[in-house]
Image (cartoon, rainbow, N blue to C red):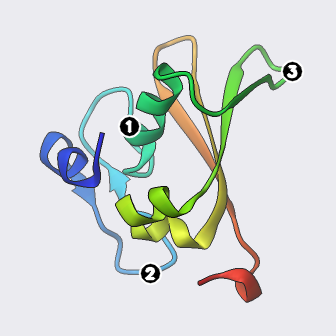
Amino acid sequence: MTRASTLTQYRVYFPPHPSAPPVITAPGPFEGEPYWAPYFWEAVHDGDGQEFDDGCGHWVTQFSINAADIAEFPELAAYSQVCIWEDSDGFIHTENYRLPTTQRG
Protein backbone atom coordinates (compact mmCIF):
# COMPACT_ATOMS: atom_id res chain seq x y z
CA MET A 1 0.00 0.00 0.00
CA THR A 2 1.47 3.33 -1.01
CA ARG A 3 0.51 6.90 -0.19
CA ALA A 4 -0.91 7.28 -3.70
CA SER A 5 -3.02 4.12 -3.46
CA THR A 6 -4.27 5.13 0.00
CA LEU A 7 -5.37 8.52 -1.34
CA THR A 8 -7.09 6.79 -4.26
CA GLN A 9 -8.79 4.08 -2.23
CA TYR A 10 -9.86 6.10 0.86
CA ARG A 11 -11.36 9.50 1.59
CA VAL A 12 -8.74 11.37 3.64
CA TYR A 13 -9.07 14.59 5.64
CA PHE A 14 -5.97 16.78 5.85
CA PRO A 15 -6.36 18.93 8.99
CA PRO A 16 -5.18 22.54 8.79
CA HIS A 17 -2.87 22.14 11.81
CA PRO A 18 0.50 20.78 10.61
CA SER A 19 1.04 18.59 13.69
CA ALA A 20 -2.21 16.66 13.16
CA PRO A 21 -1.89 13.65 10.83
CA PRO A 22 -4.21 13.20 7.84
CA VAL A 23 -7.10 10.93 8.82
CA ILE A 24 -9.17 8.40 6.87
CA THR A 25 -12.81 9.51 6.93
CA ALA A 26 -14.25 6.79 4.68
CA PRO A 27 -16.38 4.22 6.55
CA GLY A 28 -14.65 0.92 7.18
CA PRO A 29 -11.96 -0.67 9.34
CA PHE A 30 -9.56 2.30 9.05
CA GLU A 31 -12.08 5.09 9.69
CA GLY A 32 -10.68 7.71 12.05
CA GLU A 33 -7.12 6.44 11.80
CA PRO A 34 -4.09 8.18 10.25
CA TYR A 35 -3.87 7.62 6.52
CA TRP A 36 -0.74 5.49 6.94
CA ALA A 37 -2.73 2.78 8.82
CA PRO A 38 -3.39 0.66 5.66
CA TYR A 39 0.33 0.82 4.82
CA PHE A 40 1.31 -0.61 8.20
CA TRP A 41 -1.59 -3.07 8.26
CA GLU A 42 -0.35 -4.50 4.97
CA ALA A 43 3.13 -4.79 6.53
CA VAL A 44 1.59 -6.74 9.45
CA HIS A 45 0.15 -9.22 6.95
CA ASP A 46 3.59 -9.47 5.32
CA GLY A 47 5.03 -10.54 8.69
CA ASP A 48 6.89 -7.29 9.37
CA GLY A 49 7.09 -5.46 12.69
CA GLN A 50 7.47 -6.73 16.22
CA GLU A 51 4.38 -8.38 17.71
CA PHE A 52 3.50 -8.36 21.43
CA ASP A 53 0.51 -8.95 23.73
CA ASP A 54 -0.69 -5.66 25.21
CA GLY A 55 -2.15 -7.40 28.25
CA CYS A 56 -5.69 -6.38 27.30
CA GLY A 57 -6.37 -9.17 24.84
CA HIS A 58 -4.90 -7.55 21.73
CA TRP A 59 -1.88 -8.61 19.73
CA VAL A 60 -0.18 -5.37 18.77
CA THR A 61 2.48 -4.97 16.10
CA GLN A 62 5.08 -2.28 16.62
CA PHE A 63 7.06 -0.59 13.86
CA SER A 64 10.03 1.74 14.22
CA ILE A 65 9.73 4.48 11.62
CA ASN A 66 12.49 4.33 8.99
CA ALA A 67 13.53 6.35 5.95
CA ALA A 68 11.38 4.28 3.57
CA ASP A 69 8.29 4.95 5.69
CA ILE A 70 9.03 8.69 5.73
CA ALA A 71 9.63 8.71 1.96
CA GLU A 72 6.13 7.24 1.47
CA PHE A 73 4.39 9.32 4.16
CA PRO A 74 6.43 12.47 4.92
CA GLU A 75 4.31 13.26 8.00
CA LEU A 76 5.89 10.23 9.71
CA ALA A 77 9.10 12.26 10.14
CA ALA A 78 7.59 13.56 13.40
CA TYR A 79 7.16 10.02 14.79
CA SER A 80 9.46 7.34 16.14
CA GLN A 81 7.05 4.39 16.26
CA VAL A 82 3.63 3.20 15.15
CA CYS A 83 1.73 0.42 16.90
CA ILE A 84 -1.21 -1.18 15.11
CA TRP A 85 -3.84 -3.78 16.06
CA GLU A 86 -7.28 -5.08 15.15
CA ASP A 87 -10.10 -5.09 17.70
CA SER A 88 -12.72 -7.82 18.10
CA ASP A 89 -15.09 -5.93 15.77
CA GLY A 90 -12.56 -5.85 12.92
CA PHE A 91 -11.58 -2.19 13.27
CA ILE A 92 -7.92 -1.24 12.96
CA HIS A 93 -6.35 1.07 15.54
CA THR A 94 -3.00 2.80 15.73
CA GLU A 95 -0.98 4.47 18.41
CA ASN A 96 1.62 6.86 17.03
CA TYR A 97 4.59 7.89 19.16
CA ARG A 98 6.07 11.32 18.48
CA LEU A 99 9.75 12.15 18.47
CA PRO A 100 10.85 14.83 20.93
CA THR A 101 10.83 18.21 19.18
CA THR A 102 14.64 18.38 19.27
CA GLN A 103 14.92 15.15 17.24
CA ARG A 104 12.53 16.00 14.42
CA GLY A 105 13.97 16.36 10.95
Q: Secondary structure at mark 2?
A: loop
Question: Which amino acid lies under the numbered mark 1 shown in the image of this protein?
Answer: Pro
Badge 3 marks a residue whose secondary structure is loop
Q: Position of residue 53 (x, y in %)?
A: 80, 20
Q: Which residue is the extreme one toward the front?
A: 68
Residue position marked by numbered label 3 in the rendering: 55
* Residue annotated with mark 2: 18
How crowded is the residue under tag 3: few (<14 C-alpha within 10 Å), some, or many (20+)? few
- Residue at 24 percent across and 40 percent down: it is 26
Q: Along the line of sight, which residue is nearer the eye, 72 or 20?
A: 72
Front tag of 3 and 1: 1
Q: Residue at x 45, y 69 (%)?
A: 75
Q: Is residue 64 left or right of residue 70?
A: right
Q: Reply above or below: 16 against 81.
A: below
**Front of the two marks 1 and 2:** 1
Q: Which mark is residue 38?
A: 1
Does residue 2 sit above or below 104 in this rendering?
above
